[in-house]
Image (tube, rainbow, N blue to C red):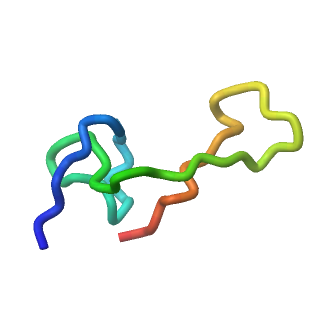
């Protein structure tokens, strides 16, 4: 199955199995975004919960 870039989800994490090869996009239809903080106040506090290691 060929992975197709979802141009609505930009992504530069090449270590993720959902990354679209030579394009900086995700191949999923949607992703889940969460946090590891009680009170997130910065971008570093958020996480892509759809990440899967290649």
Residue at the image point whose x is 43% and y is 68% from the top: 53
Identity of the residue furthest to the front in this view: 29
Relative to residue 23, is residue 34 drawn left or right? right
Q: Is residue 49 above or below residue 23?
A: below
Q: Can you give x and y, in whole percent of width and height, for residue 46 in the image?
A: 65, 40
Tally of numbered tags: 0
Residue 50: x and y in percent read: 50, 59
Of the pair 50 and 21, the residue shown nearer to us? 50
* Quadrant of the image occupied by residue 8: top left
Left or right: residue 52 compared with residue 18: right
Please, which residue is most extreme toward the right here? 38
Q: Is residue 41 left or right of residue 20?
A: right
Which residue is at the front of the view, 27 or 52?
27
Residue drawn at (71%, 38%), measured in percent from left and top?
45
Residue shown at 65% from the left, 34% from the top: 44
- Quadrant including the N terminus: bottom left
Instruction: Give the residue furthest to the top.
Output: 41
Q: Position of residue 29 (x, y in %)?
A: 34, 53
Figure quadrant of the C terminus: bottom left
Viewer-closest of 27 and 14: 27
């Amino acid at each position: 199955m060929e992975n197709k870039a979802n141009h609505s989800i930009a992504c530069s994490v090449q270590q993720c199995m959902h990354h679209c090869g030579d394009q900086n996009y995700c191949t999923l239809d949607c992703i889940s975004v969460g946090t590891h903080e009680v009170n997130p106040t910065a971008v570093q506090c958020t996480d892509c919960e759809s990440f899967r290691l290649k």
